[in-house]
Image: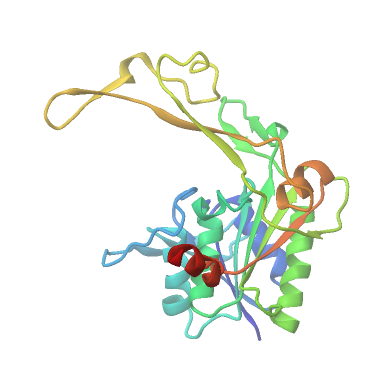
Amino acid sequence: MKKILISNDDGVLAPGIFAAKEAVKDLGEVIVVAPQENNSGVGRRLSMFKHINLKKYEMEDGFEAYGVSGSPADSVIVGANYVLDEKPDIVITGINTGINISKNDITSSGTVCAALEAVAMGIPAISASVFLDYSAFKQDENGEWYMDHDFSLAKKVLHDLCEKVLENGMPEGVDLFNLNVPSDYESEEPMITTLSNRMLVKDIMDENSEDENHIFSFAFEDDKKSFQLEDGEEGQIVMITSALCDDYEKGSDGYCLMVDKRPSITPLNVDMTRDVSIVENWYES
């Protein structure tokens, strides 16, 4: 029986990882090993030579999963080399709540970089994410925010892609697939895409920013606009903010998701080396 290791960066009890488990449970033996807490945006951070806590959790259906007190990449390493007695046939990371696209932003993603860690061990991998619009976030009677999203389409596309990889292996030159699925879709048919140039426009906000009191849950509190440095001097608090780009190249993952409104499958290769001959000619000129 095929062994399928599932991890993520949203945390072991996040709804997306449960959806991923449900999506592929008919394709083999599923093992879930993921961070105990949310680790979004940590990239490929590793807890080298540090103690990592590993404990068991129960998912919402009683399924036994393992939580790691480290990063998504840590979780894949622990899952593949410790929890399992042999390397899995495939690693799935996700389903992340929030898209992970573009060549300039993708390496910030804990979801994608956990998949890269699997590739480093010679294991085929799929990273999966969904785009959530504001309608997916709701408040309960106590004012607490929660996510309400139907993962049906993401589960279907992930299942079919995972099944194809398990049956046929990865295409030549492809190390992992990066899957992104829109919440407001016009077509269920996936498109094979390239990485768009950018996903996020980043900026800095401080207490003087005009919109600092209007950004959801990020407003500065009056008593937290500064902090004390070790030498007793006062430092200023700033915040990195971001917004999604609104301009994507046709054929890219961003265009597929935002304009065509259909699932995007981007084949990735970990070799980021540029044409050596070009650089040799440049260097020697």
Residue at 44% over, 55% down = 36
Question: Could you say which is closer to the camera, residue 95 or residue 146?
Answer: 95
Residue drawn at the location 50% of the way across and 55% of the way down: 110
Q: Which residue is more in the foreground, 202 or 276?
A: 276
Q: Is residue 125 left or right of residue 160?
A: left
The residue drawn where x is 52% and y is 72% is: 118
The correct choice, above or below, for 207 with respect to 218 in the image is above
- Across and down, in percent, residue 184 comes to 80, 41
Where is residue 61 shown, x and y percent of the image? 63, 59
In this view, 243 is above or below 50: above
| Residue positioned 49% across, 78% down in the render | 121
Would you identify the image quadrant in which residue 199 lies?
top right
Spot occupied by residue 21 in the image (x, y as percentages of width and height): 65, 64
Q: Quadrant of residue 148?
A: top right
Residue ranking furthest to the left: 231
- Answer left or right for 21 relative to 280: right
* Residue 155, percent from left and from top: 74, 59
Q: Is residue 270 visible?
A: no
